[in-house]
């Protein structure tokens, strides 16, 4: 890939702007200042990119995959209405590409949020036929016992729906803390399932989405991951 095209893919501006960056000797790749916009580079071999002597974030090409620890008080939308966008927690260069979140989390829900610009990956993880597991920790309004788990595992009828939905796994860490695993992805599913079983979710945290968790991230932090 030509250096100017690589810089454009890294979202440093138009091809013309990227050419000027290189011609002005403002760009260093792996410690070497390059001045030819047409210089061929291997994106996979770039371990360090500097502009004006400052190290830059490297965006994996052509697709990137992000795990973000979503805090409360953020909407999973590029056009939020009542709260800041969760995408505002990402660097501007990533935001400008309008990446997609894999399944929305409510503004008050926290935990693992996957973000990617790979449409095929996004479809694979969110399509019901692939049964990708998502694990949640729900804080319950009312103390619960094993009967709640039994109902959730056998299936509950959601309001305004005509078929039952069952959890893949359900257990109580304590009378007010439910650990629930589901592989479907219906609107407000965890909250609606708990309501259908006669209780109420006071707070909700997604512990895991498929193979990914966010245990090593503070709320608001993120990292690139492999698909």
Image (cartoon, rainbow, N blue to C red):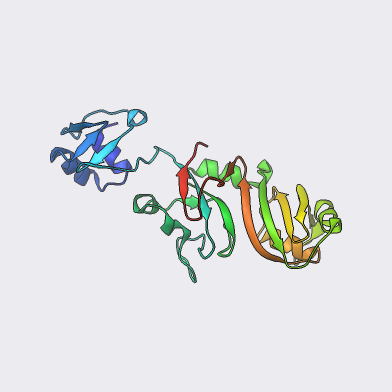
Up-down relation of residue 16 to residue 144 (above or below): above
Residue 165 is drawn in which quadrant? Answer: bottom right
Left or right of 206 in this view: 20: left
Whether residue 203 is visible here, answered yes or no, is: yes
Residue 105 is drawn in which quadrant? Answer: bottom right
Tell me which residue sits at (67%, 45%) in the image.
Answer: 133
Q: Which residue occupies the foreground of this view, 204 or 123?
A: 204
Left or right of 75 in this view: 179: right
- Residue farthest front in this picture: 174
User: Residue 37: x, y in percent?
Assistant: 19, 35
Q: Which residue occupies the foreground of this view, 156 or 225?
A: 225
User: Residue 197: x, y in percent?
Assistant: 81, 63
Up-down relation of residue 144 to residue 217 (above or below): below
Quarter holding the N terminus is top left
Whether residue 117 is visible here, answered yes or no, is: no
Tell me which residue sits at (78%, 51%) in the image.
Answer: 171
Up-down relation of residue 96 to residue 132 (above or below): below
Left or right of 227 in this view: 57: left
User: Residue 88: x, y in percent?
Assistant: 42, 59
Tell me which residue sits at (37%, 29%) in the image.
Answer: 44
């Amino acid at each position: 890939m030509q250096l100017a095209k690589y810089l454009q893919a890294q979202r440093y501006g138009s091809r013309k702007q990227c050419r000027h960056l290189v011609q002005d000797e403002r760009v260093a790749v792996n410690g070497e200042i390059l001045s030819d916009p047409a210089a061929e580079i291997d994106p996979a071999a770039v371990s360090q990119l500097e502009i004006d002597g400052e190290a830059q974030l490297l965006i994996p090409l052509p697709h990137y995959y992000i795990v973000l620890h979503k805090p409360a008080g953020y909407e999973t939308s590029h056009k939020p209405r009542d709260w800041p966008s969760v995408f505002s927690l990402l660097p501007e260069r990533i935001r400008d590409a309008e990446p997609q979140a894999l399944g929305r989390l409510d503004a008050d829900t926290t935990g693992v949020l996957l973000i990617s610009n790979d449409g095929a990956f996004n479809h694979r993880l969110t399509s019901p036929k692939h049964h990708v597991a998502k694990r949640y920790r729900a804080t319950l309004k009312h103390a619960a016992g094993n009967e709640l788990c039994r109902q959730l595992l056998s299936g509950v009828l959601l309001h305004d729906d005509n078929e039952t939905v069952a959890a893949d796994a359900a257990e109580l860490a304590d009378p007010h803390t439910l650990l629930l695993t589901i592989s479907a992805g219906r609107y407000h599913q965890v909250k609606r399932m708990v309501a259908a079983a006669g209780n109420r979710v006071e707070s909700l945290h997604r512990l895991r989405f498929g193979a990914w968790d966010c245990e090593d991230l503070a709320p608001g932090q993120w990292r690139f991951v492999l698909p």
